[in-house]
Amino acid sequence: MNDVVEPILKISNLCKIYSGDFNALKNVSLEIGKGEIVALLGPNGAGKTTLISTICGIVRPTSGKITVAGFDIVNDYRKTRSLIGLVPQELTTDSFETVFNTVSFSRGLFGRPPSPAHIERVLTSLSLWEKRDSKIITLSGGMKRRVLIAKALSHEPSVLFLDEPTAGVDVSLRKDMWQIVRELRESGVTIILTTHYIEEAEEIADRVGVINHGEIVLIEDKQTLMRKLGQKQLMMDLIEPLREIPASLNDFALDLTMSGLRLTYTFDTHEQRADITALLDGLKSAGIAFRDLQTSQSSLEEIFVNLVEGSGRRPFEREVEP
Amino acid sequence: MNFYGVLAIYRFEMSRTRRTLIQSIVAPVITTSLYFIVFGAAIGSRIQEVGGVSYGAFIVPGLIMLNLLTNSISNGSFGIYFPKFVGTVYEILSAPVSTFEIVLGYVGAAASKALLLGFIILLTASLFIELQIAHPLIMLAFLILTAISFSLLGFILGIWADNFEKLSVVPTLVITPLVFLGGSFYSTDMLPSFWQTVSLFNPVLYLVSGLRWSFYEISDVNVWASLGSVLLFLLICFSIVVWIFKTGYKLRS
């Protein structure tokens, strides 16, 4: 796993086996630095929520060690839990409580003295202050999600876990949430979020982790990951079939498929964009004409799908035609 | 000790009582008044004194105990079951609160509500009959110990139950029959000797008898046996709760 300069969260060889011998987490090791935003991607049942729940104390680890700011989550549970805020995946709220009271309740529960001023700050930052006296049952889904974030921030945590924070919210609200996450990071909060939305990870994360079948398949700096795996393809449907790729085009990563009727050029989005002109010039010189062009780009989503499907093949890795 | 955490749970639970005032307070008071009217005034006037006490006065400790037990259990069970049901229990489990503090918050609130109701019923009773309390401190001890013990039992039920039916099984099918057969409305002297012996295996008999002794100095069993039994029950319930939190039974995976 990547070395982190000043880890606030350190997970070593974490295993979780549920009754029935279901192995939910397999020897997970992970370090997360102070002030980072880390997105954990994974399909349903991959172990994301189990991982978060274990760190927060809701699920007991079978083996392994977790420390938060150097404190062990089992032996120093009071210290670690007071440093952590958790926004659960489900909209679980006390429907008949008011917004202000439920956030105040959370602050007290986490051992902090009453601070109406802090609650006001949190509610205001989440655009909830106007709704402070409203019962939660009267709020929209998006507002309820904000209430859950407010509850998690009520005791001024250093680490915030967001378990699928934008699941089921509209695009506008999702962007608001991203802005909230960025502002939280600016205030020094470390954020670990799980998500199904790849664009969410692309948009706000510093590092992206992929978890599947209880294992961290990959954890990488987002930019590095995109650079490594972010590839684009240009597909050209030819008018006349080619028997083989002309030697003059050997410098280009070309594939000939569909019985010689399609040429596919795979290139790096960041470094080789200018080569397209050279390729098109090369095609013209070789007398190759095409009737149609189309492009496709590997996204984090494809990277993710390839990793979790365990194909072992990178996106757009060349297939060999029989 | 997470004092603010305990206080938060306690206040949250007590605020629910304020929201459900009719269900929590008014309904039991009306039910108890009906008991006094029917058993105390209508039927009781035709029943001779029991142990030198009018029948209306005789049933007061039994009625208080009936309400105390059922309310302690329902408050204790609902308090923890509801967060489990709606999912908000995640917050309790991820908070820096110990087992003891969680129990203190939930059971403390459940017992407080039950005690409050007990005193309201005592006041209601005083409107219908002339009350005498021979040993108020012993009465208080019985009420407090019983409220705490049965709130703990309710807490255990709330953790055990995974649906509303299970939640009501024990209060309806176990506690209510035990209270009715535990000498709440009669003295075991009135029973044939065989059933008197059977009654001695009913734990509620010891509670009702002890509370009645604190009022009128009459009892079916020795008051110290009553006190001992409620303390033993308290210890058993607390041990089970400690075991639940140590093993994470139905709470932590």
Image (cartoon, coloured by chain):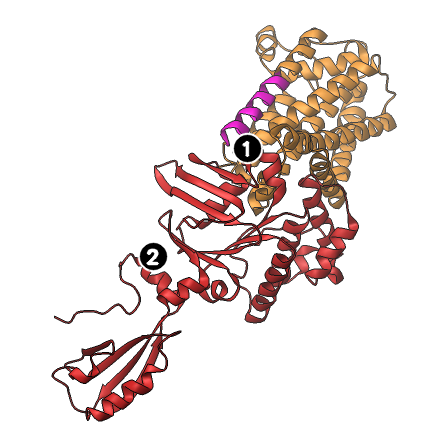
Where residue B215 sits, quadrant-wise, is top right
Chain A drawn colour? red
Q: Chain of mark 2?
A: A
**Total numbered badges shown on the rendered structure:** 2
Q: CA distance from mark 1 to mark 2?
A: 46 Å
Relative placement, left or right, of B125 versus A145 is: right
Residue range highlighted in magenta: B233-248
Q: Chain of mark 1?
A: B
Q: Nearer the viewer, mark 1 or mark 2?
A: 2
Check disc 2 and report the residue beneath it: A308
Residue B152 screen position, x and y as percent: 63, 27
Please state, as top left, top right, bottom left or bottom right, where the C terminus of chain A lies in the image.
bottom left
Circles 1 and 2 on the same subunit? no
Query: Taken as a whole, is the magenta stretch helix, strand or loop?
Result: helix
Q: Is residue A297 magenta?
A: no
Q: Is residue A321 visible?
A: yes
The vertical placement of A114 against B238, above or below, is: below
Residue A135 screen position, x and y as percent: 71, 55
In this rendered view, identify the residue nearer to me: B109 or A173. Answer: A173
Looking at the rendered structure, the secondary structure element under dot 1 is helix
Where residue A224 sits, quadrant-wise, is bottom left
Which class describes the residues within 10 Å of circle 1: few (<14), some (14-19), or many (20+)? few
The amino acid marked with disc number 1 is: Val
Looking at the rendered structure, the secondary structure element under dot 2 is helix
Mark 1 near mark 2, Cβ–Cβ under 8 Å? no
- Residue at the location (61% across, 52% down)? A189
Question: Which chain is rendered orange in the image?
Answer: B
Marker disc for residue A262: none
Residue A55 screen position, x and y as percent: 51, 42
In this rendered view, identify the residue nearer to me: A115 or A285. Answer: A285
Check disc 1 and report the residue beneath it: B169
